[in-house]
Image (cartoon, grey):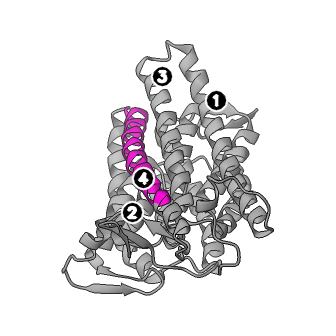
C-alpha cells in the first residue's frame, strides 16, 4: 500500500503502474489518451472525481509525447490537420475545465463525470461497431474478388458531406489526403477539447471517430494526428487542473512508469493491422469503459449500499484493460504468423495488413458509396 497525501487515499502503487502500462498499450494502438477508461478506474480506486480527471489528464500529456514520436516515425501524422485543430482544442479544454469546476463546487463532480462518460461511450460504441462490421464484410468481399485492399476500408459516407462545406478557408491535408474547410476541423477540436477538460481525457475516443467519419482521414492517420492533439490538450488541461489543486503528482509518476513502455508497443502494433482492426478495438474499449463508468455511478447513487457493485466495478476495471491488451497482442502475433506463412484464424485475416505490403505508407481510405468502393 502507498499513501497519496494530496488525494487523501491509500492504494497499492503497482495498481497504478499496471493501469498506466495497459492503457498505454491501448492508447498507442487506438490513438487515444485512454482517459475514458482511466478516469472511471481512478474513481473506482478511491480518487474523487475532480482528482481522477486531473491525474489522468496529466499522465496523458506525458504518455502522448512517447506515442507521438513513434507514430511520426511510422508516417501517421498530418501536421496541417493537427495544427488546425489546436485553437479549437484549447478553447474547448478551458470551457470543459470551468464546467467541471462548477460541478466540483456543487459536490457533484463524480456523478457528473461518470454520467457523461457512460452516455458518450454507449453512443459511440453502437455507431463504431455498426460501421466497422460493414467495413469488415466489404473487406472480405473484396478479397474474394481478388481486388487490392490496402490498409483502410471505411463504410461511412459522412465525410463527403463535411468535405463539401464551402466555408473559407479551405485547407489541403496532404498526409491525410483530404480537402476540407478549416471550420470543420476547428469544430472537431473544440468539441473534443470540451470533453478533455471536463472528463479529464485527451478527447481521442471521440476525435479519432470524428477524424475518420467526419473529416475523412484513414484510421492510421487519425490515430497519429490525434496523439499530437492529446499532447497539447493534455498539457494545457494538466496545467489548469494543477492550478485548481486537482493533481496528485505521485500518482501521475507511477502511472507514467508503466505508460512509457505500453505506448511504445501499442504504436508499433498499428503498422501490422488495417483500419477496421483499430476501430474494433476502439469500439470494444468504449463498451467496456461505458460499463466501467456505469457501475461506479450506480454505486455512488445507491450510496454504496450494494457491496457487490463496488467489487464488480473493480474487477471490470482491471479486466477490461487485460482483455484489450490481450486482443491487441493476439492481432500482433497473428500478423507475424501470417508473414511467415503460418496458419491464422479466418476472422483475423481481414484485419491484418497483407504480408509484403509497405507498412509505413499512409493510404486514403476506401469508402462504400451506393455499394461501390471509392
Distance of label 3 from label 1 (alpha carbons)? 14 Å
Going 21% across and 76% down the picture, which residue do you hit? 165
Q: Position of residue 63 (x, y in %)?
A: 63, 61
What's drawn in magenta, residue-wise?
A: 108-137
Q: Are marks 3 and 4 in contact (CB under 8 Å)?
A: no
For residue 127: magenta? yes
Distance of label 2 from label 3 (alpha carbons)? 38 Å
Distance of label 4 from label 2 (alpha carbons)? 10 Å
Q: Can residue 293 be seen by looking at this rendering?
A: yes
Distance of label 1 from label 2 (alpha carbons)? 35 Å
Q: Secondary structure at mark 2?
A: loop
Pick out the residue farthest to the top.
305
Tag shown at residue 128: 4
Distance of label 3 from label 4 (alpha carbons)? 28 Å
Q: Position of residue 252 (x, y in %)?
A: 64, 51
Q: Quadrant of residue 196?
A: bottom left
Q: Can residue 250 be seen by looking at this rendering?
A: no
Tag shown at residue 299: 3
**2 or 3: mark nearer the eye:** 2
Residue behind mark 2? 155
Q: Main secondary structure of the magenta part?
A: helix
Q: Quadrant of residue 338?
A: bottom right
Q: Secondary structure at mark 1?
A: helix
First-in-chain label (3 vs 1): 3
Q: Are marks 1 and 2 in contact (CB under 8 Å)?
A: no
Q: Is residue 264 above or below residue 287?
A: below
Amino acid at each position: 500500500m502507498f499513501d497519496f497525501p494530496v488525494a487523501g487515499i491509500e492504494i497499492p502503487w503497482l495498481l497504478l503502474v499496471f493501469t498506466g502500462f495497459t492503457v498505454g498499450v491501448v492508447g498507442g494502438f487506438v490513438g487515444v489518451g485512454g482517459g475514458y477508461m482511466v478516469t472511471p478506474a481512478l474513481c473506482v480506486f478511491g480518487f474523487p472525481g475532480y482528482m481522477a480527471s486531473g491525474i489522468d489528464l496529466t499522465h496523458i500529456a506525458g504518455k502522448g509525447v512517447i506515442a507521438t514520436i513513434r507514430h511520426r516515425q511510422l508516417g501517421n501524422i498530418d501536421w496541417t490537420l493537427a495544427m488546425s485543430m489546436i485553437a479549437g482544442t484549447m478553447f474547448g479544454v478551458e470551457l470543459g475545465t470551468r464546467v467541471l469546476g462548477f460541478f466540483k463546487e456543487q459536490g457533484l463532480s463524480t456523478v457528473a463525470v461518470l454520467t457523461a462518460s457512460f452516455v458518450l461511450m454507449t453512443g459511440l460504441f453502437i455507431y463504431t461497431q455498426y460501421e466497422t462490421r460493414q467495413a469488415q464484410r466489404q473487406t472480405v468481399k473484396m478479397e474474394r474478388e481478388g481486388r487490392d485492399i490496402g490498409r483502410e476500408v471505411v463504410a461511412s459516407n459522412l465525410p463527403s458531406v463535411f468535405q463539401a462545406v464551402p466555408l473559407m478557408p479551405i485547407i489541403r491535408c496532404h498526409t491525410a489526403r483530404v480537402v476540407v474547410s478549416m471550420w470543420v476541423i476547428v469544430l472537431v477540436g473544440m468539441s473534443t477539447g470540451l470533453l478533455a477538460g471536463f472528463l479529464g481525457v485527451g478527447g481521442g475516443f471521440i476525435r479519432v471517430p470524428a477524424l475518420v467519419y467526419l473529416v475523412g482521414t484513414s484510421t492510421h492517420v487519425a490515430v497519429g494526428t490525434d496523439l499530437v492533439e492529446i499532447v497539447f490538450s493534455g498539457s494545457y488541461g494538466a496545467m489548469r487542473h494543477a492550478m485548481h489543486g486537482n493533481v496528485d503528482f505521485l500518482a501521475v509518476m507511477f502511472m507514467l512508469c508503466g505508460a512509457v513502455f505500453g505506448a511504445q508497443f501499442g504504436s508499433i502494433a498499428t503498422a501490422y493491422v488495417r483500419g477496421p482492426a483499430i476501430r474494433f478495438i476502439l469500439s470494444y474499449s468504449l463498451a467496456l469503459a461505458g460499463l466501467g463508468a456505469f457501475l461506479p455511478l450506480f454505486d455512488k447513487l445507491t450510496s454504496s449500499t450494494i457491496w457487490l457493485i463496488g467489487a464488480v466495478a473493480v474487477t471490470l476495471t482491471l479486466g477490461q484493460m487485460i482483455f484489450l491488451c490481450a486482443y491487441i497482442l493476439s492481432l500482433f502475433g497473428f500478423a507475424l504468423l501470417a508473414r511467415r506463412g503460418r496458419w491464422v484464424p479466418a476472422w483475423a485475416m481481414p484485419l491484418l495488413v497483407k504480408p509484403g505490403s509497405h507498412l509505413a505508407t499512409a493510404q486514403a481510405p476506401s469508402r462504400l458509396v451506393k455499394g461501390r468502393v471509392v
